[in-house]
Image (cartoon, grey):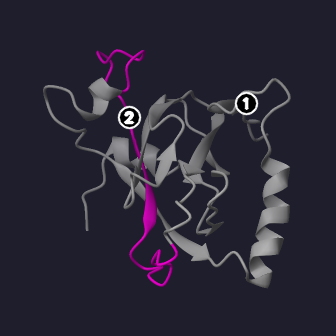
Amino acid sequence: MAESSPEMDILEKVQVDCSALKIVLSAKEDQITKIRLCNPTDHIIAFKIKSTRPSLVTGTRPMGFVRPMRAGRLIIRFKKVSADTQDFDRSAPNTDHLTIVVTLPSGEVNLEDPVTIWKGPDGPPKHQKRFTIPVEYVPPESPEALVLQTAAKAFEKKPDGKDEFDEEEMQKGK
């Protein structure tokens, strides 16, 4: 077990509101889902999104920051698969996953460029917390697919047409 440190104590408070993803892959359009990353601490946190299928699953912003006492919405895009990819392996739910890695940036890091945190001259940060989210692919013809597609319509683009990283203020407890 890892040694406790002040940095890890802070990172332990950070939460992700998603424990698993079920995706209906489409040959017609990209599938989009949102994951909420909550930062109830008094520190800025940096995040990065990783995937076991980076050519298929990406974040619209693969790296970034969440300010103190804020919750960020990470937008995850599952790219459309080509129509001739009927043999796409949906049977391996234990192998595909999305990982959200969070860390505390050091004071001298440029907060305009999150890449410097993860790929800086000193290498990746020593203290990191990982959220591993399994991805399950649902066949488009299944009854479950209809339910998932209907629910996904609630996550359409914002009225201004943007589908970027979004942040909301968290309420402090009394």
What residue type is disc 1 on?
Glu
Q: Is residue 109 magenta?
A: yes
| Image position, residue 39 (x, y; %) | 58, 40
Seen in the picture, residue 156 relative to 145 is either above or below; the reply is: above
- Per the rendering, the mark at residue 104 is 2
Q: Is residue 156 left or right of residue 107?
A: right
Occupied quadrant, residue 70: top right
Q: Nearer the viewer, residue 6 or 46?
A: 46
Query: Nearer the N terminus, badge 1 or badge 2?
Result: 2
Residue depicted at x 64% and y 30%: 164
Residue 38 in view of the camera: no
Prevalent SS, magenta region: loop
| Image position, residue 98 (x, y; %) | 46, 59
Q: Nearer the viewer, residue 133 or 42?
A: 133
Asked whether the beta carbons under mark 1 and mark 2 sit within 8 Å of each other, the answer is: no
Q: Nearer the viewer, residue 114 or 11?
A: 114
- Residue where numbered disc 1 is placed: 169
What residue type is disc 2 on?
Leu
| Image position, residue 48 (x, y; %) | 41, 41
Q: Is residue 25 left or right of residue 129?
A: right
Instruction: Classify the position of the N terminus by image quarter.
Output: bottom left
Q: Is residue 83 left or right of residue 101?
A: right
Real-space Cα distance between discs 1 and 2?
19 Å
Find the magenta span and give its range: 86-114
Residue depicted at x 77% and y 27%: 161
| Image position, residue 88 (x, y; %) | 47, 74
Q: Is residue 111 magenta?
A: yes
- Per the rendering, the mark at residue 94 is none
